[in-house]
Amino acid sequence: MLCFSFRCCLLVVLCWVASAHSCLAQQGFPLYYRYLALVGKADSAAAAKQYTNAAALYGQAARARIEKAIELPRADDHVKAARAWATARQPDSAFNHLGSAVRLGFTEATQLRQDATLAPLHSDKRWQPLLAHTERSRQQAEHQAKLVAERTTYAGPSPEIVFTPPQPYLRQFLYNDSLPFVSVNHGNFRLYFRGNSFTAAHLAEAKQLLGEALTRSLTLLQHKAYRKDINVVFVDSKAELQALTGFSVAGGFALPGYDALFLVHSGTRRLQARHELFHLVANELWGVTNSRLLNEGAAVYADNECLYPNAVYGIAAYMLQHQKARPVAELVNNFDAAARHGEVAAYLQSAALVRYLYEQYGPEKLQHLWKAGFGEFQRIYGRSLSQFEREWRAYIRKVPAPANLDWEKLQKEGCG
């Protein structure tokens, strides 16, 4: 997702959340950022064998208040607290957190049995009932998942776009009594919006933009069709998006694991459909990439619009001319740190790198890199990363930079 038009990442919502913490911090997610800091302190305390302190911090993290559109691994935090309390020989506190974990959906009884840090609890009379409860929860979860799969997998004679029931996490936003929506279907999309909203007054335009965005994603990803349903929630403003989801972002965001987009649609800014939809569709068709450079660069390339003609290459040329480009190895190995120092530069340079790989070497190799990661770059492309960077820079230097580019405006407003 694009931070300066938003999209943290995702983006695998837990994967998206885990990879996007610096992005979220910059975009005004103070509760989530505090949560990450708390977990970091707990991890450090555990590494230093300060188990009582670590347990208390993990417990705070498990109960921390958070922006509601971010789904956190609360059960896992409780298990971490329990492990630390068990190591500190505090069984009552350990069982308290394990019980909370199971109530929140933790079902890995085998993991508990094999976890050496929980060995001090094995002789306690509460241990076997806890394992039995966890195992029952696992069986119930598997039964429910099987039931849902059987009832929602379409097995008809012809391919159809099948709209499945939204998952519980997503339903809290779609069926919000205090902020209700109307909805219509259009192709792959189920559109949710207020009846008196900007989207309602410009529905034909919204449908057209979504259709174009899906076509763009499928073209880049080399797929002819997409059969899954996509929930798209339109709001009129950043403030309305925050009221609904807790996210204070300008353009919107994607929830790939839930087949959902949340988009700000107004007359004052460009709809971020291409960028956000690419995250969702790429996650489904190519899988989750561990590369932040590829994830964000490809989405910016899919959007392919940023105030100036030939924006992806043209702005990269400007950055090279004015020494604003980052070393490629930095973007590969520490994208978020690079984005903290220059967010627009990191995202747009990554887009120019992805575009070059795609157009010069083809989508098949890029898909291979997407899945394998940059550790396999030389094997896939037959050259080292430094050799590639020299080649890319030489190519971009021949591209005309936009005339009268306003770098300060671009830094402040992003791509509109």
Image: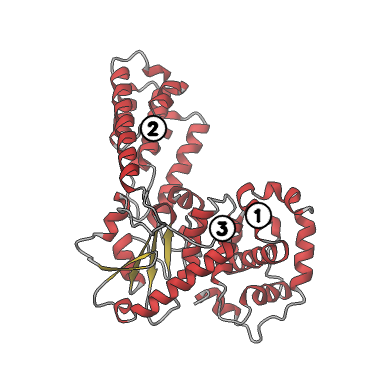
Q: Residue at x 56, y 77 (%)?
A: 306
Using the image, determine if residue 162 lies above or below residue 151. below
Mark 1 → mark 2, Cα distance in angstroms? 33 Å
What residue is shown with label 3? 295
Q: Which residue is mark 2?
A: 79
The colour scheme used here is secondary structure
Residue occupying the point 47% across, 55% down: 10
> SS of the residue at dot 2?
helix
**Vertical placement of residue 147 versus 412, above or below:** above
**Which mark sits nearer the N-terminus, 2 or 3?**
2
* Pair 1/3: label in front: 3
Q: Quadrant of residue 86?
A: top left
Q: Nearer the viewer, residue 17 or 279?
A: 279
Q: Quadrant of residue 240?
A: bottom left
Give the class, few, some or many, for how many residues have Cα within 10 Å of label 3's Cα (few <14, many ≥20).
Answer: many
Q: Residues within 10 Å of mark 2 (few under 14, many from 20)?
A: many
The span from disc 2 to disc 3 (Cα, nearest Å) is 31 Å
- Note whether 366 is above or below 233 in the view shown: above
Residue furthest to the left: 177
The foreground one among 349 and 92 is 349
**Label 2 sits on what residue type?**
Val
Residue 280: percent from the left, percent from the top? 47, 58
Mark 2 or 3: the one toward you = 3
Q: CA distance from mark 1 to mark 3?
A: 11 Å
Residue at label 1? Answer: 332
Secondary structure state at the residue bearing disc 1: helix
> Are discs 1 and 2 less than 8 Å apart at CB?
no
For residue 251, side relative to residue 199 (left or right): right
Among numbered discs 1 and 3, the one appearing first in the sequence? 3
Residue type (three-letter) at the residue carrying disc 3 = Asn
Q: In the image, what residue occupies the spot 29% across and 59% down?
A: 173
Report x, y in % for residue 176.
23, 60
